[in-house]
């Protein structure tokens, strides 16, 4: 178990938890990750997942996964399953799977208790009237005419609310606190509303549903949560969290601790806005590789280890701060550099004929799957008379210091021979369509005698290459803070996706499993798409470039 002496001072939550344990306030740390199943999880949720499960693990405690399912209009079982998959994929196991709906009967009973204590009342103000009565930051609110109903009348109305006697929105149950409170959240907040909506777990058993602020603290207490970790926007809600628990008959009183939410450049982490991108067709779905959702990152080729590393690097603070996208990209580059198999792919093929290579000969060249890790084994790559290279690796009119192939010049084909370009073939429009070259048969794994060849380029054997579609994904937005724009969709990057339909990849990739990740040498890191790829159509998604091209 960690102790306060050996914890980093920058993580104030670790310090609080360690101190509480040292003072014997708790026998075991219990945390929870409580998403609402109204959309897919995003990178901001990953930070909370890593924090809650990480704190529990570090202190030999427990962490529950609890679905905050009190708003059935926007929730679905599809989102529940997606969230479970994401948490598992990130590498975490929950102690117990819970739902706020598990506690609907207890939540109702606690509401009755508040009414009986004179601390809650049934109100008939509509939404517009409530806004008017609520006041503002500089003006106190005023009491509802219904605030002084008798306890008996409130109990009767609340019972009838549950029984379905009233229409949606006709009544609310509100806490009776202080309409002049400086904290607007304490001005008689709503506890229950009438909604005739089918619930994905409880069906039509209920027509009244508890509000989040009321439900969350009681759910925490019923589960024995010791430290309720949430983002900074809930700091103003903490007095209400404490007020509810202080005024009902419940033994556990968790400590709410707020931390900064994740603000990542060149993206958005708002479920509402992400849903808008999906609905309006700006992306192909919640799992589009450009989306900051965990499903999107997974499909793009990000690894759980890289995301956990990112969450650890950005740390936990009490002050909001913007994180550069390059930090996330650096994490995945480092991970894939260490773990991804190497392969060769040519995105814009240029035909090269090796005129002095034997016509029917095919060599099976042995290449390392990872140049820094021989334990990852080797693969066989065929080499023959005709190969493809990248069009960019040849220049008819080379720029200064050009180290790739030119007419009369030499380069080494990676893992193979040194070749020399002798003739250029062009089409009617003057475009280079073929190179006639010769190879030096004495340069396989050897340096050429009497000359120095500086350039090394990748290639694939034409006859043995596989056709592939390669999707070059880039950042979804072209400004660092798209939410600051009047219409955030105006900041969409028009070049966030380029589809290459006639790429050629080496034959070893025929056996690649869906979702497997590769470094296409000299090109970038790629993942075999899990949705659109098949044995008859290879589709690779670019995870990240080899270097940061946005610098």
Image (cartoon, grey):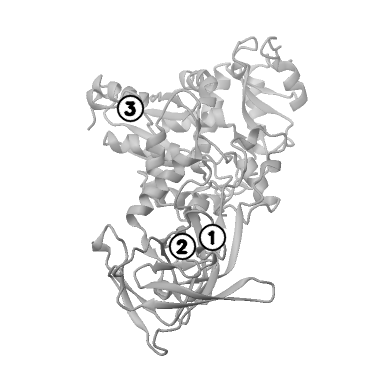
> In the drawing, does residue 53 fall left or right of residue 230?
left
> From this viewpoint, which residue is outermost toward the bottom?
360
Dot 1 corresponds to which residue? 398
> Which comes sooner in the sequence, label 1 or label 2?
1
Q: Nearer the viewer, residue 185 or 531?
A: 531
Contact (Cβ within 8 Å) of mark 2 with mark 3: no
Dot 3 corresponds to which residue? 14
Dividing the picture into quadrants, the one containing residue 164 is: top right
The crowd level at tag 3 (other Cα within 10 Å; few <14, some 14-19, many 20+) is many
Q: Position of residue 154 (x, y in %)?
A: 65, 22
Mark in front: 1 vs 2: 1
Dot 2 corresponds to which residue? 404
Contact (Cβ within 8 Å) of mark 1 with mark 3: no
Q: Secondary structure at mark 3?
A: helix
Q: Position of residue 318 (x, y in %)?
A: 45, 23
For image coordinates 54% across by 28% down, the residue present is 214
Dividing the picture into quadrants, the one containing residue 443 is: bottom left
For image coordinates 51% across by 60% down, the residue present is 541
Q: Is residue 56 above or below residue 321?
A: below
Q: Position of residue 28 (x, y in %)?
A: 28, 31
Task: Determine which of the numbered discs, if any, sits on residue 91 in the image.
Answer: none
Contact (Cβ within 8 Å) of mark 1 with mark 2: yes
Q: Secondary structure at mark 2?
A: loop
Mark pair 1, 2: CA separation: 9 Å
Mark in front: 2 vs 3: 2
> Which comes sooner in the sequence, label 1 or label 3?
3
Image quarter in which the N terminus is found: top left
> Which comes sooner in the sequence, label 2 or label 3?
3
């Amino acid at each position: 178990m960690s102790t306060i002496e050996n914890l980093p001072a920058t993580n104030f939550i670790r310090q609080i938890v360690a101190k509480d344990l040292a003072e014997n306030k708790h026998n075991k740390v219990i945390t929870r990750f409580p998403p609402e199943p109204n959309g897919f999880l995003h990178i901001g949720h990953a930070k909370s997942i890593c924090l809650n499960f990480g704190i529990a693990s570090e202190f030999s405690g427990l962490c529950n996964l609890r679905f905050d399912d009190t708003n059935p209009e926007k929730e679905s079982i599809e989102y529940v399953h997606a969230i479970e998959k994401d948490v598992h994929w990130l590498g975490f196991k929950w102690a117990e799977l819970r739902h706020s709906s598990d506690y609907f009967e207890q939540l109702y009973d606690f509401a009755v208790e508040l009414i009986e204590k004179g601390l809650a009342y049934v109100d008939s103000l509509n939404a517009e009237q409530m806004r008017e009565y609520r006041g503002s930051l500089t003006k106190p609110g005023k009491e509802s005419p219904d605030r002084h109903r008798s306890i008996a009348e409130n109990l009767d109305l609340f019972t009838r609310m549950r029984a379905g006697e009233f229409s949606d929105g006709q009544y609310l149950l509100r806490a009776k606190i202080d309409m002049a409170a400086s904290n607007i959240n304490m001005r008689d907040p709503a506890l229950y509303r009438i909604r005739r909506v089918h619930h994905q777990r409880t069906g039509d058993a209920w027509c009244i549903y508890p509000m989040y602020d009321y439900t969350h603290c009681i759910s925490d207490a019923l589960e024995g949560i010791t430290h309720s970790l949430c983002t900074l926007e809930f700091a103003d809600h903490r007095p209400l969290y404490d007020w509810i628990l202080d005024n009902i008959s419940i033994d556990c009183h968790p400590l709410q601790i707020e931390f900064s939410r994740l603000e990542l450049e060149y993206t958005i982490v708002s479920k509402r806005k992400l849903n808008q991108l999906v609905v309006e067709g700006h992306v192909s779905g919640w799992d589009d590789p450009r989306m900051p959702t965990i499903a999107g990152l997974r499909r793009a080729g990000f690894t759980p280890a890289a995301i956990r590393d990112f969450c650890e690097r950005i740390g936990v603070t009490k002050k909001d701060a913007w994180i550069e996208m390059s930090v996330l990209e650096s994490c995945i580059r480092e991970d894939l550099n260490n773990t991804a198999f190497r392969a060769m792919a040519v995105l814009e093929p240029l035909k090269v004929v090796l005129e002095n290579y034997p016509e029917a000969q095919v060599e099976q060249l042995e290449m390392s799957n990872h140049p820094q890790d021989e334990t990852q084994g080797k693969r066989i790559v065929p080499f023959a008379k005709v190969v493809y290279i990248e069009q960019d690796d040849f220049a008819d009119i080379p720029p200064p210091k050009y180290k790739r192939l030119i007419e009369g010049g030499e380069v080494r084909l990676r893992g193979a021979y040194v070749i020399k370009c002798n003739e250029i073939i062009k089409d009617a429009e003057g475009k280079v369509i073929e190179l006639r070259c010769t190879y030096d048969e004495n340069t396989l794994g050897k340096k050429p005698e009497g000359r120095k060849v500086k350039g090394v380029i990748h290639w694939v054997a034409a006859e043995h290459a596989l056709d592939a579609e390669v999707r070059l994904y880039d950042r979804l937005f072209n400004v660092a803070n798209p939410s600051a724009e009047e219409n955030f969709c105006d900041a969409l990057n028009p070049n966030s996706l380029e589809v290459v339909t006639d790429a050629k990849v080496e034959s070893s990739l025929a056996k690649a499993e869906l979702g497997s990740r590769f470094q296409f040498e000299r090109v970038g890191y790629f993942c075999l798409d899990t949705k659109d790829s098949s044995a008859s159509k290879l589709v690779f998604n670019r995870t990240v470039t080899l270097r940061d091209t946005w610098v």
